[in-house]
């Protein structure tokens, strides 16, 4: 088992060990991003729920605020790691970017990535059943790809 001293503290711009990276193939980045957007929406829903509480000054409500904001920040950070520049000027054309493999730092993004992958896999499974047979095979391929990424992330977690 690896000791925590084997890994650096992850600071943006610093070295990340190869075994702490998960490569998202270029053709799957949009699929993974969809799951991250679902995580972002879920966190936003929780923020809206907490904002509507009459007793939002209680310790429980403050804890819920903190958790929801952390989830929102994590999802936003992962979107940026996946190539979404959320601070990019609106005038810039991002459609010209060539799809590319993305290496995700699992030390920084493991929890939200795993949740996003699982959510997207379930969405794809549910959607596949309503598709014509010709498109259903493509959906099953997406589910298999997501399952493979989940297995890799879980294997990393078991080693870490």
Image (spheres, rainbow, N blue to C red):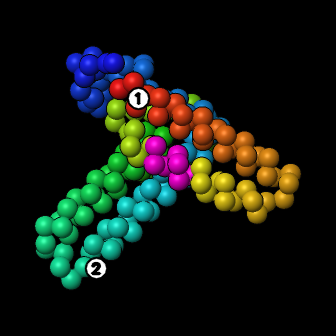
The numbered mark, 2 or 1, whose residue comes first in the sequence reads: 2
Q: Is residue 106 above or below residue 92?
A: above
Residue visible at 60% across and 34% down? 148
Percent position of residue 143, x then y:
66, 45
Q: Residues under labels 2 and 1: Cα distance?
A: 39 Å
Q: Which residue is mark 1?
A: 158
Residue visible at 23% across and 26% down? 9
Q: Is residue 119 magenta?
A: yes
Q: Which residue is mark 2?
A: 52
Image disc number at residue 110? none
Quarter the N terminus occupies: top left
Percent position of residue 53, x then y:
25, 79
Which residue occupies the foreground of this view, 72 or 144? 144
Which range is magenta?
114-120
Residue visible at 73% across and 49% down? 139
Disc 2, SS: loop
In this picture, residue 124 sits left or right of residue 160:
right
In this picture, residue 98 sits left or right of residue 154:
right
Residue visible at 37% across and 61% down? 43
Quarter the C terminus occupies: top left
Percent position of residue 122, x then y:
59, 54
């Amino acid at each position: 088992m690896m000791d925590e001293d084997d890994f650096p503290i992850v600071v943006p711009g610093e070295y990340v060990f190869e075994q702490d990276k998960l490569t998202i193939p270029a053709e799957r980045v949009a699929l993974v991003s969809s799951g991250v957007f679902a995580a972002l929406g879920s966190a936003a829903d929780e923020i809206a729920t907490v904002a509507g509480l009459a007793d939002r000054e209680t310790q429980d409500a403050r804890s819920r605020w903190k958790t929801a904001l952390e989830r929102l920040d994590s999802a936003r950070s992962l979107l940026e790691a996946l190539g979404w520049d959320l601070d990019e000027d609106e005038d810039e054309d991002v459609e010209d970017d060539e799809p590319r493999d993305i290496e995700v730092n699992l030390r920084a993004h493991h929890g939200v990535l795993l949740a996003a992958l699982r959510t997207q896999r379930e969405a794809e499974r549910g959607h596949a059943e309503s598709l014509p047979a010709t498109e259903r095979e493509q959906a099953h391929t997406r589910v298999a790809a997501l399952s493979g990424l989940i297995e890799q992330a879980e294997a990393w977690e078991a080693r870490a």
